[in-house]
Amino acid sequence: MCVMAISWQNHEQFPFVILANRDEFYSRPARAMSWWASEPDILAGRDELKNGTWFGVNENGRWAVVTNFRDPADKNSYELSRGLLVRDFLYDKRTVHEYASALITQKHRYAKFNLIFGDLQQAIYVSSELDELTTLQRGLYSLSNATLHDDWHKTTRLKKKLEQLLAENDFSFESAFSALEDRSYPEHDSQVQRTGLPIEVERALSPVFVALDGYGTRASTVMLADSSGKIQIAEKSFLDGKELKTVHHEFRVSNSTQ
């Protein structure tokens, strides 16, 4: 997952909305979002290489989404895949804050990551690069492969588009997916993020939707929860910049107070 935008407790009809793109090598096997046979209350895609996931929700309304923290200079080998963070939170029975506090002490075990997770009442951000957790307050947020406090071309554009859709009461899955398929580049190299890669690579990775040879956006996911606890979620799968299929799911959380 390389970019997301979140509206948290910021809209009367939809208190929680998230738009997210997952970027990955086309050769890495993955399954589209579905209810897991091995854990029937989890709805998520699946990375078939490490058995984790990039975005998931369970029937109690717990959800999580992960991105990598891009650091080309980091050559360390890590004990655990970052995709297990999403899976493990959805399994976990501790409260959101209990899980977050425990994760802070164990974050060194995982490949560098950003994780935003919670339920329908609270949301928390934890990064492998930061020593403290951040509790999300009412507002709009966007995140890519730096920290929640860094603004990139893609994060700024996606957050602004989400804000417009909600302000104009024009939110739909169609309009949200259109925002996620934004392939525009920065006008100048000064607007391109710098993470240590060659500038031509940084520029190629700067759009919301990435489509390169062998690597790019593999999944676009839109999730919204209304004030009654009904969750609607849709995911588009892509390969080589071309849409493969779309899946839709809708359910009401079994315990909206968890």
Image (cartoon, rainbow, N blue to C red):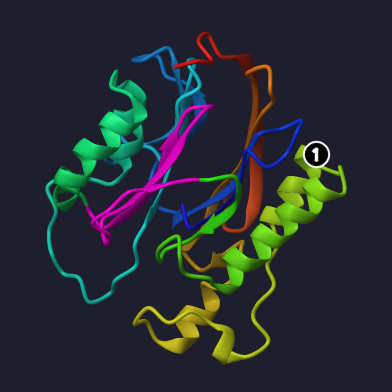
Residue at the top extreme, as displayed: 254
Location of residue 67 in the rendering, given as x and y in whole percent from the top left corner: 40, 53
Location of residue 43 in the rendering, given as x and y in whole percent from the top left corner: 48, 23
Location of residue 191 in the rendering, given as x and y in whole percent from the top left corner: 58, 85
Please state which amino acid type lies under the numbered disc 1: Ser
Residue 84 left/right relative to 243: left
Residue at the image position 40 percent from the left and 14 percent from the top:
37
Element marked by disc 1: loop
In the rendered image, the quadrant that contains the C terminus is top left
Taking the image as drawn, is residue 256 in sight?
yes
Residue 130 left/right relative to 214: left
Q: Which residue is more in the foreground, 207 or 65?
A: 65
Residue at the image position 71 percent from the left and 61 percent from the top:
160
- The image quarter containing residue 208 is bottom right
- Magenta stretch: give its range: 111-136
Give the residue pinned by disc 1: 172
Residue 123 left/right relative to 176: left
- The image quarter containing residue 230 is top right
Q: Is residue 256 above or below residue 238?
A: above
Q: Is residue 202 above or below residue 144?
A: below
Residue at the front extreme, as displayed: 137
